[in-house]
Image: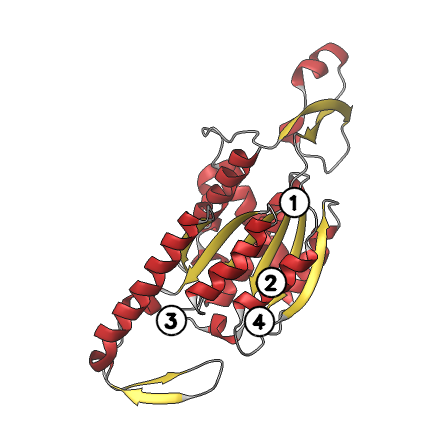
Amino acid sequence: MSQKYFSKYLEPKVLSNINSLELIAKLVVEGFITGLHKSPFHGFSVEFSQHKAYMPGDSLRFIDWKVYGRTDRYYIKQFEEETNLRAHILLDVSRSMLYGSSEITKAKYASYLAASLAYLLIQQRDAAGLVMFDENVRLKLPPKSVISYIDIILREIDNIKHGTDTNISSALHQTAERVKRRSLIILISDLLDSADDIIAGLKHFRHDKHEVLVFHIIDPQEFSFAFKGDTIFEDLESGEKIKTQPDFIKTNYTAEYESHLKQLSIQMRNNRIDYQQLFTDTPFNTALTQYLLKRKKLF
């Protein structure tokens, strides 16, 4: 199928109409890979190894037509990884992630991204693991590279039960204590916690020689604070509610939020942590490209 057909599945709004997380991950990755054919990432993580006889279900794109011309038989090019990357995907499942000003909540966007990254990693024969956390680590799946592991990771993401409070720093420290082999740490979170505490947790990984990539998930209305008229604001973690006129608090809110973003950005850069802000309407190729840039830099 055409690049245009697959590229639409990089749009969060389009994906929200699909119920299968496995299909979502597959379509996102297919759309992303299809768009790489003119980029420097073409064939980014694999190199040619050997042939095997074509079997029904194998991808036609890897048929070696030169061999077919010589033998009149179909053979598939097999590939092997250039490196053995181990990645831990840390997914924030605290209740603040449930906020959304559209049909795409931060939680939904984050789950699509985590699923797509796991699918891409394992399809490229890298090892992917999953950690889900709120104020504590709720689930930890160690990195593996076998294809069947994709189903296990996606099933866990699909069955998320969102917790209550956020304590990102605690979860980061808990995870860092358990990750012994040098890895790529991919954090997916709205980062609604103390910037200093978040950085302290991420520095734990850097101290242990891990590489870190952070995807900061933001709802557009969180950023713009474009609320009108009497509005009831509810803390999704504590349940506390307050009714007010948004215009009365917008200036202070905007200043605090922008200060938080600036502090995160500066401290991430100072600690050599790759940091990408993603709004919940941002196409997924932005995040996957950032991952490839990180991978290329590492290997």
Observer-nearest of 80 and 269: 269
**Which is nearer the N-term, disc 3 or disc 1?**
3
Is any atom of residue 268 visible in this view?
yes
Q: What is the x, y in percent for residue 80?
A: 70, 30
Can you identify the residue that label 3 sits on?
101
**Which is nearer the N-term, disc 2 or disc 3?**
3
**Which is nearer the N-term, disc 3 or disc 4?**
3
Alpha-carbon span between mark 3 and mark 4: 22 Å
The tag on residue 75 is none
User: Is the Cβ of the residue at disc 2 closer than 8 Å to that at disc 4?
Assistant: no
Alpha-carbon span between mark 4 and mark 1: 24 Å
Q: How crowded is mark 2: few (under 14 residues within 10 Å), some or many (20 or more)?
A: some
Q: What is the x, y in percent for residue 77?
A: 70, 25
Amino acid type for the residue under numbered disc 4:
Asp
Is residue 5 rendered to the left or right of residue 229? right
Amino acid type for the residue under numbered disc 1:
Arg
Alpha-carbon span between mark 2 and mark 4: 13 Å
Alpha-carbon span between mark 2 and mark 1: 15 Å
Q: In which quarter of the image is the C terminus?
A: top right
Amino acid type for the residue under numbered disc 3:
Ser
Is any atom of residue 190 visible in this view?
no
Q: Which residue lies furthest to the front in this view?
A: 207
Is residue 132 rendered to the left or right of residue 28? right
* Mark 4 or 1, closer to the camera: 1
Can you identify the residue that label 1 sits on?
182
Q: What element carries label 2?
A: helix
Q: Give the answer, above or below, for where 220 lies relative to 27.
A: below
Can you identify the residue that label 2 sits on?
173
